[in-house]
Every structure is written in structure tokens, then in C-alpha cells.
Image: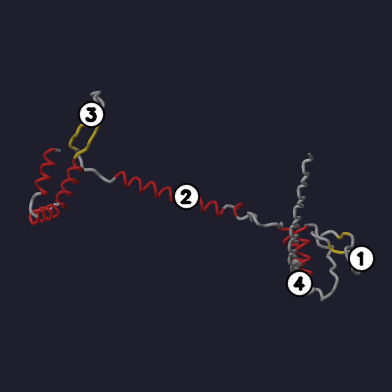
Amino acid sequence: QWSAAVESVRWLHKPWATVAADVLERVEKLPETLAAASAAASSVSVRRDYGTGVGMPSIATASKPASDSGSRRGWIIFVVLAIAFGLLRFFIDVSPGSRVRAPKSSTTSPSDEAELQRLMRALNQRPPNAPFAPDQSSPNAPSVGPARGPLENGTEFRPQSPVLESQLERLQREAEGLPTFDPPSFQPPTFQPPTFDPPTFDPPTFDPPTFDPPSF
């Protein structure tokens, strides 16, 4: 370290032309220095001798140059895992139960969907302003409950599912030409200014003092 410090001090005191030439020479020799260092690192293997009990590293010349077997093995493992993952995804997608998945946002069952399609066809085929008469011959025909409005036969169609009932009411409103959305009535808030009562000022009453002259 002391010799390196002395050399650095001497190098600083050299003229600028000599310093520039030295720097250029070192830059030109840099590839050769790196090549020599890499060759020395590839031809020397460091191992730890545990048999002696000392545990100090010993340097020995390798019998064969270092190879890239480790990196090649890692690439092979990566490719095998990628292929296995792809095959797993493929078998999951083509499995019989993978396609029969109800979406999380679904609120109707397949039977309700089929019944809704049948009701839509019936609504499209009936004349305007005609009462709706459900088909009781269908095995999935909904029940007919008590009347909720004046119809010809005194009964009204009531689906079994609340979701299907709301969808049927929307379809009926569309068939009758009524708006499907009733906007809520908006009433602007009324502003009542606060009442201000000015403070009342009562002047204080002043009673002049009474003077009683002393009696002799």
C-alpha cells in the first residue's frame, strides 16, 4: 500500500503529456489484461481442504476448463417446468367440469333463463295491449297466483323467481311502450335564512347620591 501511494504521488507530479500517454497506454492494454485475467480464472479452481482440519483455501490447477453445464442445466429445468405448466393449463381448460362454471355476477339459473326466453317469445307474438296468459302445458310453467290487477280471467302471471318477475315486468313495460326507468323526483332543498335578532341595549340607571348635611 505504501509503494502504491508513493507511485500515485509520483504519477501526480508528472507532466500532463506523460500522464496522457500513460493513460492511453493503459487503456490500450486493458483488453489484454482482461483476457489474461479471465484465462487465469478459468484455469484455476479454488477448493477448501477440510481433511487437514485447518480449513484454509488451497489453489490447485484444474484438470479441465470450466464449462457452462450449470447454466445449461438451469435452462433445461426452466423449459421442462414451462412445458409442464402449459400442459396443466390445457388439461384444466379441456376438462368436462371446467366449462360448467356459473359466472360470479350471474343471478339467474339455467331454468330461469329458459323460462325467460319462452316468455320473451310469447310477448313478441301476442298482439298489443293483450293480457298475458301463461302456458300451463309447459313442464316448467310458473304458478298462477291471486290477482294483482284486472285481467280477463281474474288471475295474473306470477313467476316463481323474484329476479325473473322483475325482468318480466320490465319486458311488459317495454311491450306496452312505457318507459323502463322512472327517474327519482328531485326537490331542491329549501334555504331558510337564519333570523337575526339585534341585541337590546338597556342603559344603566344612574341614581345621584343624596347629600345630607351634618346637623350641629
Residue 196 position in % (x across, y down): 74, 61
Which residue is drawn at the image coordinates 23% and 24% (left, top)? 52
Q: Which amino acid type corresponds to the residue marked 3 in the rendered image?
A: Met
In this view of the protein, which residue sits in the foreground, 169 or 93?
169
Residue displayed at 80% across by 73% down = 176
The reply to whether dot 2 and dot 3 touch (C-beta < 8 Å) is no
Residue corresponding to mark 1: 154
Look at discs 4 and 3 and give the one toward the viewer. 4
Horizontal side of 157 relative to 195 (left or right) equals: right
The quadrant where residue 59 appears: top left
Q: Quadrant of residue 40?
A: top left
Q: CA distance from mark 3 to mark 1?
A: 103 Å
Residue pointed to by mark 3: 56
Marker disc for residue 6: none
| Callout 3 touching callout 1 (CB < 8 Å) | no
Looking at the rendered structure, the kind of residue marked 2 is Phe
Badge 3 marks a residue whose secondary structure is loop
Gap in Å between the C-alphas at discs 4 and 2?
53 Å
The answer to whether 18 appears left or right of 145 in the picture is: left
Q: Is residue 90 above or below residue 7?
A: below
Q: Is residue 44 left or right of residue 177?
A: left
Horizontal and vertical percent position of residue 81: 43, 48
**Residue type, mark 1 in image:** Gly
Residue at image mark 4: 179
For the residue marked with disc 4, what is the amino acid? Pro
Determine contact: label 2, label 1, CB under 8 Å: no
Q: Which quarter of the figure is the N terminus placed in?
A: top left
Residue 179, by quadrant, is bottom right
